[in-house]
Amino acid sequence: MKTSNPNTGKKSDHRPLRVIKSLLLILTLSTALPLLVGCAANHASAPVKKISEGFDLEATLPHDGDAFTEGLFFDQGKLYESTGLSGRSKIRAKVDLKTGKAAAETALPNSAFGEGACVMNGELYVLTYTEGKIFVFDPETLALKRTIDGYPREGWGLTTDGARLYAGDGTSHLYILDQNGKTARTIDVRDGGNAVENINELEWIDGKIWANIWMTTDIVIINPETGKVETRFDCGELKDSIPHQNTDDVLNGIAYDKEYEKIYLTGKRWQSLFVFSPRK
Ligand SMILES: [Ca+2]
């Protein structure tokens, strides 16, 4: 806007005022835009990749086609597996990678339906599906050391960071448990702002939680601090290579051999165990 200057009678340009307004506008936009972009980024879905895009398939090993895999992990360099189904659930210990045969096995007590399993501080924990129990075994002898009763939710996946247990119940929540099964914290798992349901078998890998999503070929990588899904891997190419599948024979089983940085993937009653290493 231009007005007449009463002192000079000349047209006066209030340019400094316009410059200040412009600067204020720029300042406002420069402050708000990153916030808006940040909000959008927080609600952006995790990138989806094929597992073969980030990892090299190093080997395809035999896996027991009768094993209804619910938990898969390494302890002391040996592969362990927990299996499900009522009356048929067991722990398969020190699995020979070349043959897929377990050096030792033990059935779960009381015909419980076995679920996720892991070893923490020299104790082998096995969740049960609906029995409200957590069984604790000696990983060497497979002797039952104790039973935690009154676990307040369904048992699905289980893993550990070495100090705490992380358990799922088939919802979009993960629960941090102490050595007695007491819940210390709940993690809400979200991808692009949406709750991620049906979280199943779990594995702690380098500070993140890898999780199978039940009845899909997806594995999500979860930030345990925020619950945010950071990457989603589609493992459909693995499932497609497995013949003669029943409806329940889904991808379920993630184990990490930390010493050799290899990731082992399988599924319920799959005849194959896939070994991947990160592409470098
Ligand atoms: Ca696992």
Image (tube, helix red, strand yellow):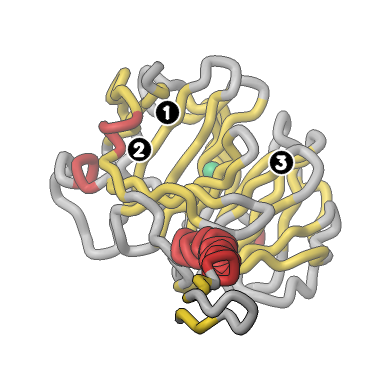
State if disc 3 and disc 2 touch (CB < 8 Å).
no
Distance of mark 2 from mark 3, alpha carbons? 27 Å
Which x, y percent locates residue 235?
28, 45
Question: In the rendered structure, are the residues bearing label 2 and label 1 in contact, judged by CB atoms less than 8 Å apart?
Answer: yes
- Looking at marks 2 and 1 on the same chain, the residue that comes earlier in the sequence is marked by 2
Which circle marks residue 101 in the picture? Answer: 1
For the residues marked 2 and 1, what is the alpha-carbon distance in whole angstroms? Answer: 7 Å
| Crowd tier of the residue under label 3, counting other residues whose Cα lies within 10 Å: few below 14, some 14–19, many 20 or above | some
Q: Earlier in the sequence, mark 1 or mark 3?
A: 1
Q: Position of residue 82 (x, y in %)?
A: 53, 47
Q: Mark 2 and ligand 1: say if the CB distance to the nearest ligand atom is below 8 Å.
A: no
Quadrant holding the N terminus? bottom left
Label 2 SS: loop
Q: Residue at x 23, y 64 (%)?
A: 247
Mark 1 Cα within 10 Å, few/some/many (few <14, many 20+)?
A: some
**Disc 3 designates what residue?**
161
Residue 248, image x and y in percent? 30, 63
Residue ID for mark 2: 64
Q: Which is in the foreground here, disc 2 or disc 3?
A: 3
Three-letter amino acid code of the residue under disc 2: Asp
Residues tagged 1 and 3 counted as in contact (Cβ below 8 A): no
Decide: is 142 above or below 172.
above
